[in-house]
């Protein structure tokens, strides 16, 4: 199995889009590419499970390693473990849904679909990279499409949001770059596998961990560098919002996890800062959401809160919490994409996203309203949906940390769920129930493409929610491998 | 002996032949501009091929003129850049009365640069430098009807005269303290004695003038704005590249004994250059001034790369310049086309540019992304490798500074992209007919931007030729 296919399929799709004519051709090509990628990812999942079942306990499977810049020891080294595979699956599901949701995008459709596919290519490349340079390369590949997507097709104060997002993410990657330089010049390689074997001296770790972690943290909306999230998400067109929250923020979470695993001693000694920031993000995000009146802002701020759980899980540095963080990434990706899709559907019909101007949508658009409710319930962590499984695992992991302060942070974060329930129930209630305004009374329900997109995401949410052992089977072995040397290192100290 | 001269100096000879041919054409009967331009472009292409064909190594005139694979590569980069500039100026020169004179000046200047790069002796070094500068001052005046153009020429000639004076003073001090002008002998006589340090600082100032490093950058913005765009792009790409090539070899080879001193000077220059270049670029509206200041910031990054003083240092410099040729010239190409056909040169004129000129917009955008250092364009690799080379000495503060400054530079490059794609304009630049030659030049640049980075063998090849401290 050559994982380069995961980059090749989007690349071919993007090139094919360039030569296509008219929206009809373009969207069909985009969909074919995305579905092909989804099938490829599913197939890789199958192969992966077969390999694992056959007792292959290597950290990374399907590795291939080519020398890229020989003189600088930069390799094109790719391979996956359960965590990256989960992320790849998540990405491919969201890409299919995103393309379905953009089915009628007639403004500069070629550029639009091209950029969407380019963004996803960056994400795939990022998740399969085992070389920090390649990782960084793909991280930045994914930045520019976001800028253009928001700036050209966005709504509201789009150019400022796009600029803010691009600059903050670039600042993040600048910090990541400094961190990587530190690692490179102290280990003489960018290769994650080699670095893990070699280990990095504690002094170096302590100096460079903050750079790299903070850099990726900006991508993952780490407090206080979350300010690009609300504006960026709110201004972006629907599919771009889905990609931003569902894929792009995961790049940050995944990067944070890898960095923490590469520099465990530093991660452990700075964990109190990470956990404090994560807790603030969780609480602050939840309360800030309460004050929002725009549906997209509601979801964007709640994303800050939810991504806080990812950081919290990573900061706690044990197997269960990291496991929870990964599940939360997948769950949040699906849930938030679904939410944005529903909001996009509502907005394209009513042309408003203000909660106060909406109401009674259940009567005219039962399907969209149901999707909206499902996304909301998943967001507030109702059992049966993925959000519950993810947050529960994070809490369980966090509680394993015996320190009183950490338990206090866990309790605080847990309490935020109540706030989440308040804003979610309020927003859904006002939007869906109650009297409907006259101008909205004749609106149509979802079309087939929207139903398909939402259905796909809901299936994902339900699989994780109802059968969490499936995703655990995929990621648990890998988080165990990732965390076992770390737990050892920490207990030794 | 003569065989040797023909082989080792073939790039210089080919160029001289071209200069004489142009002179004969000028004396002969009147020809249409288009035919002259086509002839020149083909000749330049042949010239490039001649340069690539044979890689030799050797010295001539008792060490005054030296050449090797690296120097030939550097000259080829310059040849390529001049070819691209010439193709891009097609729209501008087509209706110009003095096409041949323009090329005479540019080629003479290029010839000077070849001698500069090949110099093994301070005399020929100075000769080459002057030969490359003085024709440019005349060329800067080539928008004959514009006052700004002659102002630019005046500023260029005065400031270069000044910097040459400083350089010459440095050279004479060096001669006075060491008794020799030959690079290879000079190295043994260099030490940290005050007079030589003073001479060295004068020399560096002279160089800094030519590459427009802060605080010796004040002439650039006005000259770039006033001069015709072809000359501006020549100044900002070719002439800077030639001086930088020489600068790094002089630093690494001749001034090797005082490496720790020039390391500090370079760091200082780099920090101010990046910062000032960036801060001023933010506020520019004229496209040429904008590119002028942004290229000042780029030079700052180059200085960081040089400060690494390893093989990677000089390799990343040459690699970056190759990329810089493609990306900066792609940007200048679009700007020069728009300026030649509509006369508009401001960034605010580019609002809504994408609606009318999608192809030009994408070329400009890709070029700006490459200048900003966004993957997958080559600029990403170029800048990263410069900073990696700079970080080799463990100066992480400097790298953090540079990395954060990349974000600032990102802002102003994106500002242009924003104007092109996202802003509305009641009277955007109308749809332009692009001459075939200019289009080809653009495709060369874009292909260069996309390939030079991803194809690692280019860097590895340059690395294999490069030299460290």
Image (spheres, rainbow, N blue to C red):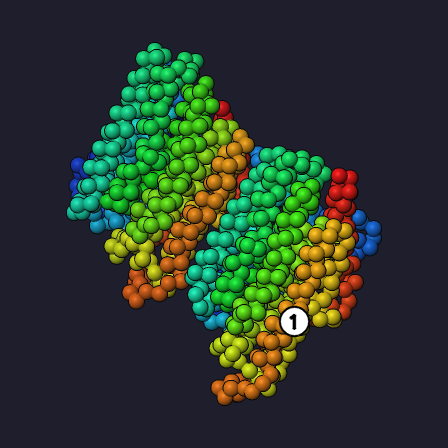
Relative to B223, residue A291 above or below = below
Query: Does dot 1 land on a helix, a strand or a loop?
Result: helix
Return the x and y of residue A330 as percentages of the image width and height.
Answer: 67, 61
Left or right of B171 on screen, residue B418: right
The residue at 55%/41% (across/down) is A178
Q: Which residue is drawn at 41% across and 28% down?
A: B265
Looking at the image, which is closer to me, B443 or A279?
A279
* Residue pointed to by mark 1: A421
Residue A72 lies, in percent from the top left, at 57, 35
- Residue drawn at x 42%, y 21% is B255
Residue situated in front as seen by the camera: A67 or B159 = B159
The location of residue B332, given as percent across then percent down, is 34, 48
Q: Which of A165 and B451 is in front in this view?
A: A165
Residue B188 in which image quadrant: top left
The residue carrying pointer 1 sits among few (fewer than 14), some (14 to 19) or many (20 or more) residues within 10 Å by Cα, namely some
Could you tell whether A200 is left or right of A238 in the image?
Answer: right
């Amino acid at each position: 199995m050559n994982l380069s296919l995961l980059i090749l399929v989007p690349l071919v799709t993007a090139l094919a889009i360039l030569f296509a004519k008219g929206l009809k051709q373009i969207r069909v090509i985009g969909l074919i590419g995305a579905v092909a990628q989804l099938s490829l990812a599913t197939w890789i999942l199958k192969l992966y499970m077969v390999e694992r079942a056959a007792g292959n306990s290597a950290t990374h499977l399907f590795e291939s390693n080519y020398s890229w810049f020989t003189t600088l020891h930069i390799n094109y080294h790719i391979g996956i473990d359960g965590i990256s595979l989960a992320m790849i699956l998540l990405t491919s599901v969201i890409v299919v849904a995103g393309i379905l949701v953009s089915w009628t995008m007639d403004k500069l459709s070629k550029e639009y679909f091209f950029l969407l596919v380019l963004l996803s290519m960056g994400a795939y490349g990022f998740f399969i990279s085992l070389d920090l340079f390649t990782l960084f390369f793909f991280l930045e590949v994914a930045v520019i499409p976001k800028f253009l997507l928001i700036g050209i097709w966005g709504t509201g104060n789009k150019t400022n949001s796009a600029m803010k997002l691009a600059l903050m993410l670039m600042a993040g990657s600048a910090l990541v770059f400094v961190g990587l330089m530190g690692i490179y010049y102290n280990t003489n390689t960018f290769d994650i596998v080699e670095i893990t074997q070699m280990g990095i001296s504690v002094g170096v770790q302590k100096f460079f961990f903050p750079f790299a972690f903070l850099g990726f943290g900006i991508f993952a909306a780490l407090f206080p560098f979350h300010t690009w999230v609300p504006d960026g998400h709110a201004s972006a067109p629907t599919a771009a919002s889905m990609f931003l929250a569902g894929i792009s923020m995961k790049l940050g979470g995944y990067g944070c996890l890898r960095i923490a695993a590469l520099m465990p001693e530093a991660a452990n000694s700075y964990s109190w800062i990470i956990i404090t920031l994560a807790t603030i993000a969780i609480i602050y995000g939840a309360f800030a959401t309460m004050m929002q009146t725009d549906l997209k802002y509601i979801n964007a701020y709640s994303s800050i809160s939810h991504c806080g759980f990812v950081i919290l899980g990573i900061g706690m540095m044990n197997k269960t919490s990291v496991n929870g963080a990964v599940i939360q990434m997948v769950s949040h990706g699906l849930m938030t994409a679904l939410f944005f899709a529903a909001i996009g559907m509502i907005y394209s019909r009513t042309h408003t996203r203000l909660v106060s101007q909406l109401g009674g949508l259940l009567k005219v658009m039962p399907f969209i309203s149901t999707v909206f409710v499902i996304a909301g319930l998943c967001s507030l962590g109702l059992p049966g949906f993925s959000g519950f499984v993810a947050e529960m695992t994070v809490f369980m992991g966090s509680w394993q940390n015996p320190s009183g302060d950490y338990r206090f942070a866990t309790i605080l974060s847990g309490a935020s769920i109540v706030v989440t329930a308040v804003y979610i129930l309020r927003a859904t209630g006002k939007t869906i129930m109650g009297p409907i305004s006259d101008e909205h009374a004749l609106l149509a329900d979802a079309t087939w493409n929207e139903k398909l997109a939402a259905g796909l995401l809901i299936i994902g949410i339900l699989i994780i929610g109802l059968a969490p052992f499936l995703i655990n089977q995929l990621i648990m072995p890998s988080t165990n491998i990732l965390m076992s040397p770390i737990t050892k290192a920490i207990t030794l100290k | 002996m003569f065989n040797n001269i023909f082989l080792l100096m073939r790039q210089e000879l080919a160029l001289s032949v071209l200069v004489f041919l142009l002179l004969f054409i000028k004396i002969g009967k009147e020809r249409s501009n288009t035919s002259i331009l086509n002839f020149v472009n083909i000749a330049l292409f042949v010239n490039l091929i001649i340069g690539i064909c044979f890689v030799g190594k050797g010295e001539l005139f008792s060490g005054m003129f030296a050449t090797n694979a690296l120097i030939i590569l550097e000259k080829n980069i310059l040849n390529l850049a001049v070819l691209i500039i010439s193709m891009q100026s097609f729209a501008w020169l087509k209706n110009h009365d003095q096409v041949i004179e323009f090329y005479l000046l540019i080629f003479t200047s290029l010839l000077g640069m070849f001698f500069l790069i090949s110099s093994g002796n301070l005399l020929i070094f100075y000769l080459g430098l002057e030969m490359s500068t003085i024709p440019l001052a005349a060329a800067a005046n080539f928008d004959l009807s514009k006052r700004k153009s002659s102002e630019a020429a005046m500023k260029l000639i005065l400031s270069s005269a000044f910097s040459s004076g400083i350089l010459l003073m440095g050279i004479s001090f060096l001669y006075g303290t060491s008794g020799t002008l030959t690079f290879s002998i000079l190295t043994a006589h260099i030490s940290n004695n005050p007079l030589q340090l003073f001479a060295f600082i004068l020399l560096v100032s002279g160089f800094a003038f030519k590459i427009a490093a802060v605080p010796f950058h004040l002439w650039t913005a006005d000259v770039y704005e006033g001069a015709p765009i072809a000359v501006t792009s020549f100044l900002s790409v070719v002439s800077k590249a030639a001086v930088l090539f020489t600068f790094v070899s002089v630093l690494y080879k001749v001034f090797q004994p005082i490496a720790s001193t020039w390391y500090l000077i370079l760091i200082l220059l780099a920090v101010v250059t990046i910062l000032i270049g960036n801060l001023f670029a933010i506020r520019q509206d004229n496209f040429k001034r904008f590119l002028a200041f942004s290229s000042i910031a780029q030079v700052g990054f180059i200085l960081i790369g040089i400060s690494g003083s390893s093989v990677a240092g000089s390799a990343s410099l040459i690699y970056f310049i190759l990329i810089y040729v493609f990306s900066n010239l792609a940007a200048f190409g679009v700007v020069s086309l728009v300026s030649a056909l509509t006369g508009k040169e401001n960034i605010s004129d580019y609002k809504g540019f994408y609606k009318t000129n999608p192809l030009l917009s994408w070329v400009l955008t890709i070029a700006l992304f490459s200048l900003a250092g966004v993957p997958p364009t080559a600029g990403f690799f170029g800048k990263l490798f410069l900073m990696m080379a700079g970080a080799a000495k463990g100066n992480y503060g400097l790298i953090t500074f540079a990395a954060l400054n990349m974000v600032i530079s990102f802002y102003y490059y994106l500002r242009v992209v924003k104007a092109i794609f996202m802003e509305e304009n009641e009277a955007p630049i109308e749809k332009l007919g692009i001459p075939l030659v200019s289009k080809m030049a653009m495709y060369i640049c874009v292909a260069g931007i996309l390939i030079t980075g991803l194809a690692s063998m280019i860097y590895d090849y340059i690395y294999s030729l490069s030299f460290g401290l």
